[in-house]
Image: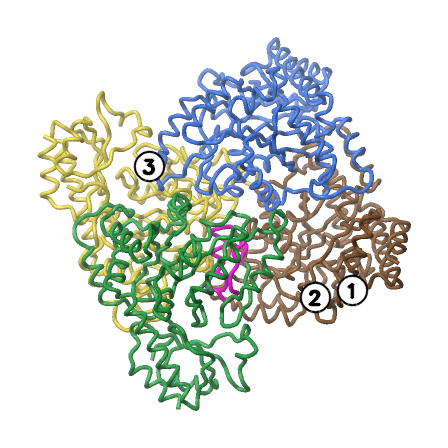
Chain colours: A brown, B blue, C green, D yellow
């Protein structure tokens, strides 16, 4: 009953097999190898256009490098205040990009257009006293298990493009968002106005493999230098590439995400029917947020369940806890089993 | 006949097996797992003392984080001008640590005490106009295949400690240095005055696994934050740790390095007896530097050999090329075979 | 009728005279001169204790250097969201100190203890995923013309000291705060828990002279290097020092601030009695915030008045505008005359 | 007998008068004032073309901002190893621009084209492992009192422009160089290929006033933000501008530099005829480098002379000291008198 995080899961068998397969004879270092070439081609197929792909070891790196590529040092990155880059990366955007980060409120971890518009109005263009908004970062799926639709992304992108602001998507759980929406990856990204995507494979079944996918190719040269200088150019690069190769092949990545999402839905459905827990909102990806009494949570943990208590400080009024409730996050993964879910639900009572 | 670099080799079978073994059930993320605990213990055993260990994805990260941990922003890092941090990391030390890098000359990529002393004399303590020397970085084995002995390290360390300067060892090829010296790792590091080691497993047989090993524990807390902020805290951390576990077990790392070193010696011996090539200096690790006519090099490449031409600009007078000669670097690895070496030598003629 | 900003005023005659007096024969550069020594002694007298003083050219520099001295690169600086460092310094704190800035809400530009406590609770100590709160920055007088009392500063300082957080005071208008409170400078600073003060003379009557005053002397050495590296060590240093000498002598600085504050009070009193404007809240320093109809503002500008419209987005509910009102900031200075004020009030009608 | 540095001198009377004149009524802050407009026009006249001018408080700021404007974070700045930016700015270029600094040797503090060409050859374009050369910085007059001619600047500029490298001139003593060459400022700058000039008034007679002069206007917007973020946008900006206005008017700046240069020539001539000192090389600006016995130097200091011993580590073979000699730097200024010079020479004996 491990619902602590999807990064507690190991790697999928197919990803491991791809890694083994890549460990043949010698291969050029630093990305000049065949596996890397094939992954780049696979990404172009997947996104239905020419893209530049930069593989890195962590999602924080993918986010911070994306921001560094699209922001001048005097820029600001705007996003939800709960966004990973703002709340959980120990200042990596400030370090990599020199930027100021602007964390905005928004129900269920999503930004509303009016909130973004109001923030932009406070930072007029051409005034040297203010950091200049340079990047809008949208996390999809969000930190609260919700998903921006292509239309929602498009509306936000159109809004900020009038100011020349680039759109970044933090896709640590991009797979789960696509699985939920059943749309083409292109629809949720460049066709909706996204310039650069942090495309994460780690949470979805890889060991450590993340990609910066550039739809706006103008920053390609910059990213090459930025990645090396930031110590993210892996020398035996084929071993990062191989993880993506195994993960992307035959829609394996979507199968894994479908499973994780289905487990979240099963968990939400079960808890909704329980008396010991209450679902905060319908899960759209692989995270369920449940209100429970702390005593219930303690009892579950004694039975071996692992999950985190979650902050309630940013909850919208309609999502407020009732007396005696605490909020808990339950994350499913490609490894979550129906048995795990059902046992958890049964224990909740 | 791949002598381009040791990072063209794949991973050793035992490292791959350790990786597979780590892919069992769920495990806490971010280093809070059992494999990581075991690797920390193995490092303490190996170095015969309490150490703090921070695993990262690249050698550049290990170097730059070491410097950031031991230097204030106004510090300077002193090292050989051919050192990887100075010549091949695209400014990572400047980025991670804010420091100024001071590249000094020295025969066969090693620093002489008098060179370091002269440099320090130019940067007097307490003068705000100069960057303050904060870290001496020694690469061992060096970029030219030579090795600092424990005595040489000790002499340099003692010299700089009078100025309160920390000693960093870039050990991307630390295994090859230890294999050459047949000394205890402690003798070449903290017993000789080294405060922090970049301990590289990648070139020696891992996929992507490097460690910052702190002998001076005072920077432990700082490194925890620095690593996360620099996007080098791998979420599924057990997969970096497992590589080290497999590599360190049963002296596997030394066996691999012994083999690579032996192949370099076999290559050097063979080339010394040839008429088509001349060895620049005796290899002490897994790199051979040979003078050849460019036509010879071209012929070898046509036969499938891979290796790089090398800069001759920093050669000491006694290592100068003769008329018509060019310098080439030939790197062996744990995967290099006797047959490869012998075929190469035979082709040289 | 210049109420645009106190930095529109020139320099006081006594400051100019001190500058002339310093322009005698040769003097050592970089702060090794007699005028600088005398200013350091005057600061020690003023604050009734040993202090370290670093003179710089701008208030932004004083703020950002203070933060850099007291925060590690992975630190966070907490302050009011309207604070100059957060809203009007184009990311200088992020640049100088590498930090993340956390802008919190608070009525009339002041932070309430509970707001700070809640923010700290969201950033637990020892967790590498979050920037670590390192500095609390309080602006006094604030951006909305209000003043923290020594007690209020003490309460906030005591709150954050339990987390090892340093307290910085942005005193660009420190003189106006002291003039309002009629307390000793020591009471509003180190006796209340302030570790470092940006002590600004520019707005109060100098040409360009700001000081970082260290009450916590542990950062003295660091600040010396940080100031030089940040290009804020003025070579003909006596000319910055002389401005402070003239400004501090014979309580000239307080006389100037008293006058500016009195002009603000006269303006507020006048406007309160008018029908064309409404005071937002009682001024405590040299800034008056007035609600007027835009047409009134336009008419005043036509008559030669200079002042800025101000954002109403952060106003507390009790300070909300009424229908048709806009908020305007009116800043007085040591040069403001009663005639200017009276004419403005008369024009408001 | 003050020959320690030209920044030991005060300010010229005309500069002080201009400062006084600027202290009239209110004026817009941050450079939106009439004095600033007039200085911009004066600069355009002086350089015979449209330029963008950014005034700052220190020469280090002018240098570091110039580099930040013309280099990406992964860039390298190439200059003489004795250049102020490399040797005396405590890492400001690394801080402001993120760059790596490359200090090259060269006789009498000047760079030879072949030295620059060799350095560029070691840093091939398009290789992510190396910092990319982005700026060539030439100090004129140099740190050793010599001067690059327009032809020399042109040759170096043409050499690096083939790699897309920008040319920066550190003109802390630009006035002395122009006075020596009797050429138009345009000839020594943009007509010779200079893209950006640090134009220093401080050493030449101002209190604290330096300018970044952009001949390549493409970096104008960037510099506006960079200057503010680096805390170099002086709020009462007219007081920096006024110094330039007084200094530039009626060729006052050239008169002052002519005097300083003449005093250096008088000093050199006198010392050449003495038995107690030997001139290292003919002065071309306002610095004389003399070899003396340490006992002679000690005796001069006892008589009240102030000057610095200078490093001999970078001297070309033809400039080597003779047995028992030490090198000393003697700097003249606009305030140096013939009597001071003659007394010093007489004391040398």
Q: Quadrant of the N terminus of chain C?
A: bottom left
**Which sits in the foreground, D339 or A31?**
D339
Q: Which residue is mark 3?
A: D110
Of helix, strand and loop, which one carries label 3? loop
- What's the CA distance linking mark 2 and mark 1? 10 Å
Labels 2 and 1 touching (C-beta < 8 A) = yes
Query: What is the span of residues highlighted in magenta in the rendered image?
Result: C76-101
**Which label sits on residue B305?**
none
**Which sits in the foreground, A212 or B276?**
A212
**Which sits in the foreground, D196 or B65?**
B65
Relative horizontal placement of residue A219, taking residue C61 as reference (left or right): right
Closest to the camera, between mark 2 and mark 3, is: 2
**Which label sits on residue A315?**
2
Labels 2 and 3 touching (C-beta < 8 A) = no
Q: Quadrant of residue C262?
A: bottom left
Dot 2: chain letter: A
Q: Earlier in the sequence, mark 2 or mark 1?
A: 1
Closest to the camera, between mark 1 and mark 3, is: 1
Residue A4 drawn above or below residue D148: below
- What's the CA distance linking mark 1 and mark 3? 71 Å
Q: Which residue is mark 1?
A: A280
Residue drawn at x 25%, y 71% is D24
């Amino acid at each position: 009953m491990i619902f602590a995080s999807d990064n507690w899961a190991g790697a999928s068998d197919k990803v491991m097999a791809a890694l083994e397969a890549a460990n043949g004879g010698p291969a050029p270092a630093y990305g000049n190898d065949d596996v890397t070439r094939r992954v780049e081609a696979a990404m172009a197929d997947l996104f239905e256009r020419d893209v530049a792909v930069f593989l890195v070891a962590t999602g924080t790196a993918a986010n911070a490098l994306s921001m560094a590529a699209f922001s001048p040092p005097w820029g600001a990155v705007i996003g939800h205040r709960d966004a990973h880059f703002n709340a959980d990366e120990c200042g990596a955007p400030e370090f990599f990009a020199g930027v100021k980060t602007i964390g905005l409120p928004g129900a269920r971890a999503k930004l509303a257009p009016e909130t973004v518009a109001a923030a932009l109005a406070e930072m007029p263009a051409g005034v040297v006293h203010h950091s200049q908004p340079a990047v809008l970062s949208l996390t999809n799926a969000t930190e609260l298990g919700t998903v921006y639709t292509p239309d929602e992304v498009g509306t936000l992108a159109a809004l900020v493009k009038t100011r020349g602001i680039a759109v970044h998507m933090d896709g640590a759980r991009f797979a789960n968002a696509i699985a939920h929406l059943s749309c083409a990856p292109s629809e949720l990204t460049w066709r909706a106005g996204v310039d650069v995507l942090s495309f994460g494979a780690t949470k979805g079944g890889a060991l450590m493999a993340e990609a910066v996918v550039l739809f706006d190719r103008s920053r390609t040269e910059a990213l090459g230098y930025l990645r090396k200088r930031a110590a993210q150019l892996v020398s035996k690069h084929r071993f990062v590439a191989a993880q993506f190769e195994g993960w992307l092949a035959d829609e394996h990545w979507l199968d894994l995400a479908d499973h994780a999402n289905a487990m979240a839905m099963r968990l939400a459905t079960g808890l909704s029917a329980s008396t010991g827990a209450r679902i905060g909102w319908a899960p759209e990806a692989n995270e369920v947020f449940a209100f429970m009494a702390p005593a219930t949570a303690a009892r579950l943990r004694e039975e071996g369940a692992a999950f985190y208590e979650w902050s309630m400080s940013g909850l919208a009024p309609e999502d407020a806890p009732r007396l005696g409730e605490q909020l808990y996050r339950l994350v499913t993964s490609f490894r979550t089993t129906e048995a795990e879910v059902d046992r958890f639900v049964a224990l909740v009572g």
